[in-house]
């Protein structure tokens, strides 16, 4: 379980998160929507300790993420993250991309790491690209590689930050299909997304961010079909 | 009796020693300069502004004072201190530092060429800072600057000729001695130029080959 309690975060004078409370239970899919600049990415970075927080608490499976004594590298093994940009390692093949972290971080042998990597790559539909170099692949394929690369660490949680935003429209579908696959596997996920209909379909909870606060949160039916807050209504009328 | 003796097959060994000495000091300078340059480039890429101004200033001096002056100053200074160094040692030290200064800038831009987003992606997989350096920034960044690295290496081979001024018997000095003995400067200098070409050209061909292979 991920527990986020009254999290504040500033960059210099700019307060980006102004007291976020959010719980994500095991097996849940939580989508975060909201205008650009509202702090969605920053929250994900704070969850896996890539960014520090100013106050509040984030607890993942009982571990206080921002405690000085917490081993951040170990913590991140439990929190797979996929970004808007896929960031494939261009010097490695698809298989090596996905096998690198299990090998050097978890200490598996090369053969073991490649076995896990192969399994995840086949799962996301890249079984025929194992020895390809990522720069030769489409954005959609590279994004699926990024997902498999994160999954190869076998994390109980996955964080997705607008993973389809940088893709050509015709490639969005294959990546969303991969996310659906993970949802069906029972993966616990936080998805920052602009794909409202996708959020409606897969989410257990939807949170609408506005200027560093959760303006509205609830089931997809509540937040997306019958938003109570005016700002949510305005936002949805713009993006739908 | 002839004052000058023409070039003969007996000179082969002498010339070959000159060629090997050029290759030898170049290899030493490129190796040492690359290793030190990696360290310097990394420090440059990761340091605060003040460290960079200091280190950058030192490197600027090494890069902008002509190598020949550095060689003469260093060996004169060391000699005056009472520790005369073998020309090979003195030459290797200066040529390596000179190489380091250029390689440092090459590697700095290599380290910086790996975008922050990619480093964050690596960290998000649980890699430590040093694992990210070792497995992501070094291999990706160094590939990106390989052509510049090769350019520096090739010019070091040519610059090594200057070590002759402090008495190291490399190819050029060998040639000078042959010229004063034979009085056949044209032929000898053409020969020497050819030797430099024969040392450098395969390297630059190999570089092109590697570049093409890395493009995939
Ligand atoms: N590293 C940073 N340094 C300074 N400001 C930042 C940094 N990252 C994000 N910001 C600012 O924080 C705000 C929220 O950014 P972000 O979390 O990326 O929003 P979102 O993902 O919702 O679009 C923006 O105003 C952005 O400019
Ligand atoms: Mg964002």
Image (tube, coloured by chain):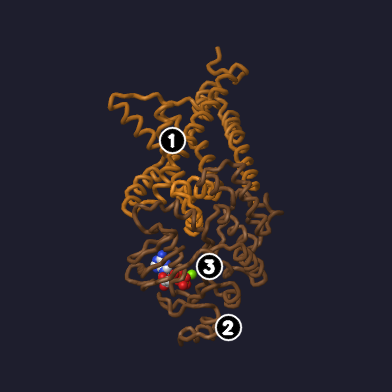
Whether residue B151 is visible to the viewer of this picture, yes or no, is no
Chain identifier matching the orange colour in the rendered picture: B
Mark 3 and mark 2 lie on one chain; the one further toward the N terminus is 3
Dot 1 alpha-carbon crowd within 10 angstroms: few under 14, some 14 to 19, many 20 or more: many
Tell me residue B174's x, y (percent).
51, 25
Tell me residue B80's x, y (percent).
29, 27
Whether residue A218 is visible to the viewer of this picture, yes or no, is yes
Residue holding disc 1:
B95
* Count of marks placed on residues: 3
The answer as to whether the residues below labels 2 and 1 share one chain is no
Chain identifier matching the brown colour in the rendered picture: A
Residue at far right of view? A128
Q: Which of A110 and A96 is in front in this view?
A: A110
Q: Which of A7 and B14 is in front in this view?
A: A7
What SS does tag 1 mark? helix
Dot 2 alpha-carbon crowd within 10 angstroms: few under 14, some 14 to 19, many 20 or more: few
Quarter holding residue B20? top right
What SS does tag 3 mark? loop
**Chain ID, mark 1:** B
């Amino acid at each position: 379980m991920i527990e986020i309690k009254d999290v504040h975060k500033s960059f210099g004078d700019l307060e980006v998160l102004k007291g976020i409370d959010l719980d994500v239970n095991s097996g849940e899919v939580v989508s975060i929507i909201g205008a650009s600049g509202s702090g969605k990415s920053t929250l994900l970075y704070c969850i896996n300790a890539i960014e520090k927080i100013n106050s509040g608490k984030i607890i993942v499976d009982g571990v206080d993420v921002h405690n000085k004594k917490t081993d951040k590298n170990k913590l991140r093994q439990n929190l797979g993250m996929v970004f808007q940009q896929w960031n494939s390692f261009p010097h490695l093949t698809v298989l090596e991309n996905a096998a690198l972290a299990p090998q050097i971080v978890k200490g598996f042998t090369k053969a073991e790491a490649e076995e896990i990597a192969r399994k995840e790559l086949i799962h996301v539909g890249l079984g025929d690209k194992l020895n390809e170099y990522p720069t030769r692949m489409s954005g959609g394929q590279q994004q699926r590689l990024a997902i498999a690369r994160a999954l190869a660490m076998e994390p109980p949680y996955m964080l997705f930050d607008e993973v389809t935003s940088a893709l050509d429209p015709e490639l969005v579908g294959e990546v969303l299909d991969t996310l659906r696959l993970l949802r069906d596997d029972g993966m616990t996920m936080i998805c920052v997304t602009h794909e409202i209909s996708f959020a409606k379909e897969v989410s257990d909870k939807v949170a609408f961010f506005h200027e560093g606060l959760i303006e509205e949160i609830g089931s997809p039916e509540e937040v997306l079909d019958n938003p109570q807050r005016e700002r949510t209504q305005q936002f949805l009328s713009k993006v739908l | 009796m002839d004052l000058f003796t023409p070039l003969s097959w007996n000179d082969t060994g002498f010339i070959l020693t000159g060629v090997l000495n050029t290759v030898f000091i170049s290899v030493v300078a490129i190796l040492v300069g690359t290793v030190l340059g990696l360290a310097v480039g990394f420090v440059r890429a990761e340091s605060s502004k003040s460290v960079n101004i200091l280190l950058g200033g030192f490197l600027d001096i090494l890069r902008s004072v002509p190598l020949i002056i550095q060689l003469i100053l260093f060996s004169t200074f060391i000699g005056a201190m009472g520790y005369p160094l073998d020309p090979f040692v003195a030459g290797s030290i200066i040529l390596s530092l000179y190489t380091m200064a250029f390689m440092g800038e090459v590697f700095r831009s290599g380290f910086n060429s790996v975008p922050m987003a990619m480093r964050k992606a690596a960290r998000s997989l649980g890699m430590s800072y040093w694992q990210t350096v070792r497995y992501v920034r070094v291999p990706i960044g160094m590939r990106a600057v390989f052509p510049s690295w090769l350019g520096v290496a090739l010019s070091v081979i040519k610059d090594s000729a200057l070590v002759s001024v402090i008495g190291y018997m490399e190819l050029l000095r060998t040639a000078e001695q042959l010229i004063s003995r034979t009085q056949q400067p044209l032929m000898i200098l053409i020969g020497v130029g050819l030797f430099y070409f024969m040392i450098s050209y395969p390297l630059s061909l190999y570089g092109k080959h590697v570049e093409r292979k890395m493009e995939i």
